[in-house]
Structures are given as structure tokens and as C-alpha cells.
Image: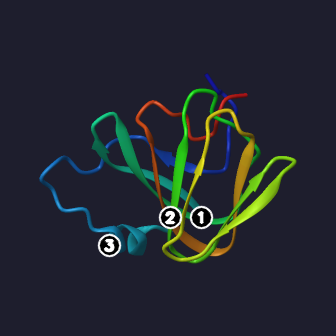
Amino acid sequence: MNDRKYPYVNHMNILCDALQLVDIPALVEKCTDQWYNQTVCKVNESVVRLGIVKGEYHWHKHDDEDEFFFTLSGELLIDIEEKETVILKQHQGYVVPQGIVHRTRAPEKTVILMIETAGIIPTGNE
């Protein structure tokens, strides 16, 4: 388990149950954090997480899980170690496979959705 402290706000609780409206714009409007991650809902064995990001995340990987990133607004940069930087503009998505060292960056406030397994540790495996 990763015990390091990071300057990110990660809410792992499931905010909305099945048959409940998910209001992403209302959640974005209420957020005052620069780097925010909230589990919105669970779908089978996966979760949908809302990310509101600005700045740079740390390099990390997930040993056993893939991550899907989808940009709702702004621009998300995904750096893949020793390979490339993928730029996601509004309404574009990208899967980072398990075991790939990566980091995300956003030059301005960016709103994203992430789909991943419910047990994933957002800050990655050391």
C-alpha cells in the first residue's frame, strides 16, 4: 500500500448509487481544490471518477489495472515514460495499460472522467 502523502484530494467513497442522477457540472462548480478526484459511481466492478485538475501529477504506475481518461473540458496531457506525451482535448479519451509508468498534467483547469477498477490506488504502486 502506498503511504506517501500527496497534495491531491482523493475521495474514494461512492458519491451516487444506481438509479441516482449524476450532476457533473454541479460537482465541478462546488470544487475549490486544484487537484481533486471523486468516485462518482460504481458500474459492475469498475468505478467512474471525476477529476478536476490543474498542474502536474507525479510519475506512477498501476501494476494490475488499466486506466481510461476522458476529457470533458480543458486539455489533459498524459506523459508515458520514455515514449510520448498524449494530448487529450475535449471529448477525447485514452487508455493507459497496466504496468505503464505515466503522469498526467493540465496547464489550465481541466475536467476529466476516469474509468478504472474499484480497487485501484489513484496515486499508483511504488
Q: Contact, CB < 8 Å: mark 1 with mark 2?
A: yes
> Which residue matches tag 1?
53
Q: Residue furthest left?
A: 19
Going by the numbered disc 2, the residue's amino acid type is: Ile
Q: Is residue 106 above or below residue 5?
A: below
Q: Residues within 10 Å of mark 3 (few under 14, many from 20)?
A: few
Query: Cα distance, mark 1 to mark 2?
Result: 8 Å
The picture places residue 86, in percent across and down from the top left corner, at 71, 63
Q: Do tag 3 and tag 1 residues touch (Cβ < 8 Å)?
A: no
| Within-10-Å neighbours for mark 2: few <14, some 14–19, many 20+ | many
Name the quarter where the N terminus is drawn.
top right
Q: Position of residue 66 (x, y in %)?
A: 55, 39
Pair 1/2: label in front = 2
- Residue type at mark 1 is Val
Residue at 83% over, 51% down: 83
Marks 2 and 3 sit apart, C-alpha to C-alpha, by: 14 Å
Q: Can residue 22 be seen in this view?
A: yes
- State which tag comes first along the sequence, 2 or 3: 3
Specify the farthest residue to the top: 1
Residue 57 makes an appearance in the image: no
Name the image quarter holding residue 76.
Answer: bottom right
Residue 112: mark: 2
Of mark 3 and mark 1, the one earlier in the sequence is 3
Where residue 25 sits: x, y (%)?
35, 74
The C terminus: image quadrant: top right
User: Which badge, 1 or 2, is on the more N-terminal residue?
Assistant: 1
Q: Nearer the viewer, mark 2 or mark 3?
A: 2
Q: Name the residue under label 3.
A: 26
Three-letter amino acid code of the residue under disc 3: Ala
